[in-house]
Amino acid sequence: MISLFSRISRMSTSPYFTSKGRQTRSAAREAIAALSTNQKEPRRHIKIEYEKRHEEDSSRDDKKTEDVAAKKRKKDTSTVQTQGSTWQPLNWREQLVHIREMRKTRDAPVDSQGCEKTADESQSPETVRYQVLISLMLSSQTKDQVTFAAMEKLKAYGLTIENILTTSTSKIGELIYPVGFWKKKAEYIKNATKICAENYNGDIPPTVEELVKLPGVGPKMAHITMNVAWGQVTGIGVDTHVHRISNRLGWVKKLTKLPEETRIAVESWLPREEWDELNVLLVGFGQQTCLPVSPMCEFCLNSKICPEGRRRTKGKLEKETKKKLSPRKDRKETKT
Ligand code: SF4
Protein backbone atom coordinates (compact mmCIF):
# COMPACT_ATOMS: atom_id res chain seq x y z
CA MET A 1 0.00 0.00 0.00
CA ILE A 2 2.79 2.42 0.93
CA SER A 3 4.59 1.69 -2.32
CA LEU A 4 1.33 2.36 -4.28
CA PHE A 5 0.95 5.81 -2.67
CA SER A 6 4.59 6.71 -3.24
CA ARG A 7 4.29 5.78 -6.93
CA ILE A 8 1.11 7.86 -7.31
CA SER A 9 2.65 10.85 -5.55
CA ARG A 10 5.73 10.59 -7.77
CA MET A 11 3.46 10.56 -10.84
CA SER A 12 1.43 13.59 -9.63
CA THR A 13 4.60 15.76 -9.43
CA SER A 14 5.93 14.68 -12.89
CA PRO A 15 5.82 17.15 -15.80
CA TYR A 16 3.43 14.83 -17.57
CA PHE A 17 0.73 15.58 -14.97
CA THR A 18 1.53 19.24 -14.32
CA SER A 19 1.90 20.59 -17.90
CA LYS A 20 -1.18 22.65 -18.82
CA GLY A 21 -3.83 21.24 -21.16
CA ARG A 22 -2.03 18.02 -21.80
CA GLN A 23 -3.60 15.85 -19.12
CA THR A 24 -7.22 15.60 -17.98
CA ARG A 25 -8.38 14.36 -14.59
CA SER A 26 -9.97 11.26 -16.14
CA ALA A 27 -6.69 10.25 -17.72
CA ALA A 28 -5.06 10.57 -14.34
CA ARG A 29 -7.74 8.36 -12.76
CA GLU A 30 -7.20 5.73 -15.48
CA ALA A 31 -3.48 5.75 -14.81
CA ILE A 32 -4.08 5.33 -11.06
CA ALA A 33 -6.53 2.49 -11.73
CA ALA A 34 -3.99 0.78 -14.00
CA LEU A 35 -1.38 1.03 -11.28
CA SER A 36 -3.81 -0.27 -8.67
CA THR A 37 -4.60 -3.41 -10.70
CA ASN A 38 -0.88 -4.12 -10.85
CA GLN A 39 -0.80 -4.13 -7.01
CA LYS A 40 -2.98 -7.22 -6.58
CA GLU A 41 -0.42 -9.15 -4.55
CA PRO A 42 -0.22 -6.90 -1.49
CA ARG A 43 -4.03 -6.40 -1.49
CA ARG A 44 -4.75 -10.07 -1.47
CA HIS A 45 -2.18 -10.46 1.23
CA ILE A 46 -3.84 -7.79 3.37
CA LYS A 47 -7.21 -9.38 2.77
CA ILE A 48 -5.94 -12.83 3.75
CA GLU A 49 -4.42 -11.36 6.88
CA TYR A 50 -7.77 -9.83 7.75
CA GLU A 51 -9.62 -13.07 7.13
CA LYS A 52 -7.15 -15.00 9.24
CA ARG A 53 -7.48 -12.49 12.05
CA HIS A 54 -11.22 -12.51 11.62
CA GLU A 55 -11.28 -16.32 11.77
CA GLU A 56 -9.13 -16.28 14.88
CA ASP A 57 -11.35 -13.64 16.48
CA SER A 58 -14.54 -15.49 15.66
CA SER A 59 -13.16 -18.85 16.80
CA ARG A 60 -12.13 -17.14 20.07
CA ASP A 61 -15.66 -15.69 20.33
CA ASP A 62 -17.21 -19.06 19.49
CA LYS A 63 -15.09 -20.75 22.15
CA LYS A 64 -16.16 -18.11 24.68
CA THR A 65 -19.83 -18.58 23.75
CA GLU A 66 -19.44 -22.36 23.91
CA ASP A 67 -17.79 -22.11 27.34
CA VAL A 68 -20.60 -19.91 28.64
CA ALA A 69 -23.23 -22.29 27.17
CA ALA A 70 -21.44 -25.31 28.66
CA LYS A 71 -21.32 -23.59 32.05
CA LYS A 72 -25.01 -22.78 31.76
CA ARG A 73 -25.82 -26.34 30.73
CA LYS A 74 -23.75 -27.70 33.57
CA LYS A 75 -25.47 -25.37 36.01
CA ASP A 76 -28.88 -26.19 34.61
CA THR A 77 -28.61 -29.98 34.46
CA SER A 78 -26.61 -30.45 37.61
CA THR A 79 -28.58 -32.15 40.33
CA VAL A 80 -26.10 -31.91 43.09
CA GLN A 81 -24.73 -29.45 45.52
CA THR A 82 -22.70 -29.85 48.63
CA GLN A 83 -23.43 -28.39 52.00
CA GLY A 84 -20.29 -28.66 54.05
CA SER A 85 -19.06 -32.15 53.28
CA THR A 86 -22.55 -33.59 52.74
CA TRP A 87 -23.87 -34.24 49.27
CA GLN A 88 -27.37 -32.91 48.68
CA PRO A 89 -29.52 -32.86 45.56
CA LEU A 90 -30.03 -29.44 44.06
CA ASN A 91 -33.50 -27.94 44.63
CA TRP A 92 -34.68 -30.69 47.00
CA ARG A 93 -36.34 -28.18 49.34
CA GLU A 94 -38.24 -26.57 46.49
CA GLN A 95 -39.20 -29.99 45.12
CA LEU A 96 -40.52 -31.01 48.55
CA VAL A 97 -42.50 -27.77 48.92
CA HIS A 98 -44.05 -28.40 45.50
CA ILE A 99 -44.96 -32.00 46.40
CA ARG A 100 -46.59 -30.81 49.64
CA GLU A 101 -48.54 -28.26 47.62
CA MET A 102 -49.69 -30.93 45.14
CA ARG A 103 -50.59 -33.26 48.03
CA LYS A 104 -52.40 -30.70 50.17
CA THR A 105 -55.86 -32.18 49.54
CA ARG A 106 -54.67 -35.55 50.90
CA ASP A 107 -57.08 -37.50 48.75
CA ALA A 108 -54.82 -40.28 47.47
CA PRO A 109 -55.68 -43.94 48.31
CA VAL A 110 -52.88 -44.03 50.90
CA ASP A 111 -54.50 -41.16 52.82
CA SER A 112 -57.72 -43.03 53.50
CA GLN A 113 -56.66 -46.66 53.15
CA GLY A 114 -53.00 -46.77 54.16
CA CYS A 115 -51.70 -48.70 57.18
CA GLU A 116 -52.34 -45.71 59.47
CA LYS A 117 -56.06 -45.96 58.71
CA THR A 118 -56.58 -49.70 58.88
CA ALA A 119 -56.14 -50.49 62.59
CA ASP A 120 -59.12 -50.50 64.93
CA GLU A 121 -58.26 -47.76 67.43
CA SER A 122 -60.87 -49.00 69.90
CA GLN A 123 -58.74 -52.11 70.58
CA SER A 124 -55.90 -52.40 73.12
CA PRO A 125 -52.54 -50.75 72.19
CA GLU A 126 -51.00 -54.21 71.64
CA THR A 127 -53.78 -55.20 69.22
CA VAL A 128 -53.57 -51.85 67.39
CA ARG A 129 -49.82 -52.39 66.93
CA TYR A 130 -50.43 -55.96 65.76
CA GLN A 131 -53.01 -54.77 63.23
CA VAL A 132 -50.61 -52.12 61.91
CA LEU A 133 -48.01 -54.83 61.39
CA ILE A 134 -50.46 -57.18 59.64
CA SER A 135 -51.68 -54.36 57.41
CA LEU A 136 -48.09 -53.67 56.33
CA MET A 137 -47.41 -57.35 55.71
CA LEU A 138 -50.43 -57.46 53.41
CA SER A 139 -49.52 -54.23 51.60
CA SER A 140 -46.40 -55.37 49.75
CA GLN A 141 -47.08 -55.82 46.01
CA THR A 142 -50.71 -54.93 46.67
CA LYS A 143 -52.81 -51.82 46.06
CA ASP A 144 -54.02 -49.90 49.11
CA GLN A 145 -57.65 -50.55 48.18
CA VAL A 146 -57.10 -54.34 48.13
CA THR A 147 -55.14 -54.29 51.40
CA PHE A 148 -57.86 -52.19 53.02
CA ALA A 149 -60.60 -54.62 51.93
CA ALA A 150 -58.61 -57.60 53.30
CA MET A 151 -58.07 -55.77 56.60
CA GLU A 152 -61.81 -55.11 56.87
CA LYS A 153 -62.49 -58.85 56.47
CA LEU A 154 -59.78 -59.77 59.01
CA LYS A 155 -61.04 -57.23 61.57
CA ALA A 156 -64.61 -58.47 61.15
CA TYR A 157 -63.32 -62.00 61.78
CA GLY A 158 -61.29 -60.84 64.79
CA LEU A 159 -57.74 -59.65 64.13
CA THR A 160 -56.06 -60.28 67.48
CA ILE A 161 -53.01 -62.38 68.28
CA GLU A 162 -55.10 -64.84 70.32
CA ASN A 163 -57.64 -65.33 67.55
CA ILE A 164 -55.13 -65.75 64.70
CA LEU A 165 -53.16 -68.28 66.79
CA THR A 166 -56.13 -70.61 66.63
CA THR A 167 -56.97 -69.90 62.99
CA SER A 168 -55.76 -72.19 60.21
CA THR A 169 -53.42 -70.86 57.52
CA SER A 170 -55.98 -71.75 54.85
CA LYS A 171 -58.63 -69.69 56.63
CA ILE A 172 -56.24 -66.73 56.84
CA GLY A 173 -55.60 -67.17 53.11
CA GLU A 174 -59.31 -67.16 52.45
CA LEU A 175 -59.73 -63.95 54.44
CA ILE A 176 -56.91 -62.05 52.81
CA TYR A 177 -57.51 -63.15 49.20
CA PRO A 178 -56.85 -61.47 46.65
CA VAL A 179 -53.85 -59.58 48.04
CA GLY A 180 -50.62 -60.24 46.16
CA PHE A 181 -48.93 -63.53 47.15
CA TRP A 182 -51.84 -64.29 49.49
CA LYS A 183 -50.84 -67.94 50.07
CA LYS A 184 -47.31 -67.03 51.15
CA LYS A 185 -48.57 -64.11 53.21
CA ALA A 186 -51.06 -66.33 55.05
CA GLU A 187 -48.12 -68.50 56.17
CA TYR A 188 -46.07 -65.47 57.16
CA ILE A 189 -48.94 -64.06 59.22
CA LYS A 190 -49.49 -67.34 61.03
CA ASN A 191 -45.77 -67.76 61.87
CA ALA A 192 -45.20 -64.10 62.81
CA THR A 193 -48.22 -64.25 65.12
CA LYS A 194 -46.76 -67.29 66.90
CA ILE A 195 -43.44 -65.43 67.44
CA CYS A 196 -45.27 -62.37 68.81
CA ALA A 197 -47.25 -64.57 71.24
CA GLU A 198 -44.27 -66.62 72.39
CA ASN A 199 -41.39 -64.10 72.40
CA TYR A 200 -43.05 -60.73 72.90
CA ASN A 201 -45.80 -61.49 75.38
CA GLY A 202 -48.61 -60.91 72.93
CA ASP A 203 -47.13 -57.69 71.49
CA ILE A 204 -45.04 -56.98 68.40
CA PRO A 205 -41.23 -56.58 68.47
CA PRO A 206 -40.18 -53.06 69.54
CA THR A 207 -37.08 -52.58 67.34
CA VAL A 208 -36.24 -52.64 63.65
CA GLU A 209 -33.65 -55.36 64.21
CA GLU A 210 -36.22 -57.65 65.82
CA LEU A 211 -39.04 -56.76 63.43
CA VAL A 212 -37.01 -57.76 60.37
CA LYS A 213 -36.51 -61.20 61.91
CA LEU A 214 -40.23 -61.88 61.56
CA PRO A 215 -41.13 -63.87 58.43
CA GLY A 216 -42.21 -61.63 55.56
CA VAL A 217 -41.08 -58.39 57.23
CA GLY A 218 -38.47 -56.27 55.45
CA PRO A 219 -36.76 -52.99 56.37
CA LYS A 220 -39.49 -50.83 54.78
CA MET A 221 -42.21 -52.50 56.85
CA ALA A 222 -40.04 -52.41 59.96
CA HIS A 223 -39.39 -48.65 59.74
CA ILE A 224 -43.03 -47.84 59.01
CA THR A 225 -44.14 -50.14 61.85
CA MET A 226 -41.77 -48.34 64.22
CA ASN A 227 -43.20 -45.03 63.12
CA VAL A 228 -46.93 -45.85 63.03
CA ALA A 229 -47.18 -48.50 65.77
CA TRP A 230 -44.47 -47.37 68.20
CA GLY A 231 -44.34 -43.64 67.36
CA GLN A 232 -40.59 -43.71 66.70
CA VAL A 233 -38.92 -42.46 63.53
CA THR A 234 -36.10 -44.92 62.90
CA GLY A 235 -35.74 -44.56 59.13
CA ILE A 236 -37.53 -43.70 55.89
CA GLY A 237 -40.04 -46.25 54.70
CA VAL A 238 -38.98 -46.74 51.08
CA ASP A 239 -41.48 -48.66 49.01
CA THR A 240 -41.72 -48.81 45.23
CA HIS A 241 -43.17 -45.26 44.98
CA VAL A 242 -40.54 -43.64 47.21
CA HIS A 243 -37.81 -45.58 45.38
CA ARG A 244 -39.01 -44.52 41.92
CA ILE A 245 -39.68 -40.86 42.75
CA SER A 246 -36.37 -40.42 44.60
CA ASN A 247 -34.55 -41.62 41.49
CA ARG A 248 -36.58 -39.40 39.17
CA LEU A 249 -36.05 -36.30 41.29
CA GLY A 250 -32.30 -36.90 41.48
CA TRP A 251 -32.38 -37.55 45.23
CA VAL A 252 -29.77 -40.27 44.90
CA LYS A 253 -26.17 -39.58 43.92
CA LYS A 254 -26.17 -42.57 41.58
CA LEU A 255 -29.29 -44.30 40.29
CA THR A 256 -30.28 -47.09 42.66
CA LYS A 257 -31.76 -50.47 41.86
CA LEU A 258 -33.23 -51.51 45.18
CA PRO A 259 -35.48 -49.64 47.63
CA GLU A 260 -33.04 -50.41 50.43
CA GLU A 261 -30.22 -48.69 48.49
CA THR A 262 -32.50 -45.70 48.00
CA ARG A 263 -33.30 -45.57 51.72
CA ILE A 264 -29.61 -45.47 52.64
CA ALA A 265 -28.88 -42.88 49.92
CA VAL A 266 -31.74 -40.53 50.87
CA GLU A 267 -31.15 -40.88 54.61
CA SER A 268 -27.52 -39.82 54.05
CA TRP A 269 -28.51 -36.24 53.23
CA LEU A 270 -32.20 -35.62 54.06
CA PRO A 271 -32.56 -33.89 57.45
CA ARG A 272 -34.08 -36.24 60.00
CA GLU A 273 -37.08 -34.03 60.69
CA GLU A 274 -38.26 -34.72 57.10
CA TRP A 275 -38.20 -38.53 57.42
CA ASP A 276 -41.49 -38.93 59.28
CA GLU A 277 -43.76 -37.55 56.58
CA LEU A 278 -41.85 -38.68 53.51
CA ASN A 279 -43.39 -42.11 52.96
CA VAL A 280 -47.04 -41.02 52.95
CA LEU A 281 -46.20 -37.85 51.03
CA LEU A 282 -44.42 -39.64 48.19
CA VAL A 283 -46.68 -42.70 48.10
CA GLY A 284 -49.73 -40.45 47.51
CA PHE A 285 -47.76 -38.38 44.99
CA GLY A 286 -46.82 -41.59 43.18
CA GLN A 287 -50.43 -42.76 43.17
CA GLN A 288 -51.78 -39.52 41.72
CA THR A 289 -49.11 -37.65 39.74
CA CYS A 290 -45.69 -39.28 39.45
CA LEU A 291 -47.24 -42.49 38.15
CA PRO A 292 -45.02 -45.51 37.50
CA VAL A 293 -45.45 -45.72 33.72
CA SER A 294 -46.62 -42.31 32.51
CA PRO A 295 -45.88 -39.64 35.10
CA MET A 296 -47.96 -36.50 34.58
CA CYS A 297 -44.96 -34.21 34.28
CA GLU A 298 -46.79 -31.50 32.33
CA PHE A 299 -49.05 -30.94 35.36
CA CYS A 300 -46.32 -31.33 37.95
CA LEU A 301 -44.96 -28.25 39.74
CA ASN A 302 -41.53 -29.86 39.63
CA SER A 303 -41.36 -30.28 35.86
CA LYS A 304 -38.66 -27.59 35.50
CA ILE A 305 -36.54 -28.67 38.45
CA CYS A 306 -36.86 -32.44 38.11
CA PRO A 307 -34.32 -34.13 35.81
CA GLU A 308 -36.83 -36.74 34.67
CA GLY A 309 -39.57 -34.14 34.21
CA ARG A 310 -37.28 -31.92 32.12
CA ARG A 311 -36.33 -34.87 29.95
CA ARG A 312 -39.92 -35.93 29.40
CA THR A 313 -41.43 -32.48 28.81
CA LYS A 314 -38.57 -31.58 26.45
CA GLY A 315 -39.22 -34.72 24.41
CA LYS A 316 -42.91 -33.90 24.22
CA LEU A 317 -42.26 -30.29 23.19
CA GLU A 318 -39.91 -31.45 20.42
CA LYS A 319 -42.51 -33.90 19.15
CA GLU A 320 -45.20 -31.21 19.12
CA THR A 321 -42.93 -28.75 17.31
CA LYS A 322 -42.02 -31.39 14.71
CA LYS A 323 -45.68 -32.16 14.21
CA LYS A 324 -46.48 -28.48 13.69
CA LEU A 325 -43.63 -27.98 11.25
CA SER A 326 -44.19 -31.12 9.17
CA PRO A 327 -46.44 -30.60 6.09
CA ARG A 328 -49.94 -31.91 6.54
CA LYS A 329 -50.64 -35.04 4.50
CA ASP A 330 -54.25 -34.11 3.92
CA ARG A 331 -53.26 -30.75 2.37
CA LYS A 332 -53.69 -30.91 -1.43
CA GLU A 333 -50.81 -29.77 -3.55
CA THR A 334 -51.63 -26.58 -5.47
CA LYS A 335 -50.35 -26.15 -8.98
CA THR A 336 -48.82 -22.79 -9.76
S1 SF4 B 1 -41.75 -33.80 36.89
FE1 SF4 B 1 -42.57 -35.80 36.34
S2 SF4 B 1 -41.01 -37.27 36.98
FE2 SF4 B 1 -40.58 -35.35 38.04
S3 SF4 B 1 -41.62 -35.50 40.00
FE3 SF4 B 1 -43.02 -34.48 38.60
S4 SF4 B 1 -44.29 -36.12 37.72
FE4 SF4 B 1 -42.47 -37.09 38.67
Image (cartoon, rainbow, N blue to C red):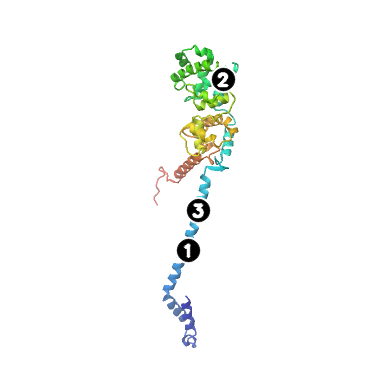
Residue nearest the viewer, comparing 156 with 208: 208
Q: Secondary structure at mark 3?
A: helix
Count the marks: 3
Against 60, residue 281 (above or below) is above
**Label 2 crowd bin: few (<14), some (14–19), many (20+), radius 10 Å:** many
Q: Nearer the viewer, mark 1 or mark 2?
A: 2
Q: Secondary structure at mark 1?
A: helix
**Label 3 crowd bin: few (<14), some (14–19), many (20+), radius 10 Å:** few
Which residue is tagged 2? 129
At x 49%, y 86%, the residue is 18
Question: Sequence order check: which comes first, mark 1 or mark 2?
Answer: 1
**Residue 110 spot, x, y in % from top left:** 54, 26
Question: Sequence order check: which comes first, mark 3 or mark 2?
Answer: 3
Q: Secondary structure at mark 2?
A: helix
Q: CA distance from mark 3 to mark 1?
A: 20 Å
Question: Sequence order check: which comes first, mark 3 or mark 1?
Answer: 1
Residue type, numbered disc 1: His
Asked if residue 80 can be seen in this view, the reply is yes
Residue type, numbered disc 3: Asp
Residue at the outermost top position: 166
Residue nearest the viewer, comparing 210 with 129: 210
**Label 1 crowd bin: few (<14), some (14–19), many (20+), radius 10 Å:** few
Which residue is tagged 1? 54
Which residue is tagged 3? 67
Asked if residue 109 can be seen in this view, the reply is no
Q: CA distance from mark 1 to mark 2?
A: 78 Å
Q: CA distance from mark 3 to mark 2?
A: 59 Å
Q: Which mark is residue 104?
A: none
Q: Nearer the viewer, mark 3 or mark 2?
A: 2
Against 31, residue 308 (above or below) is above
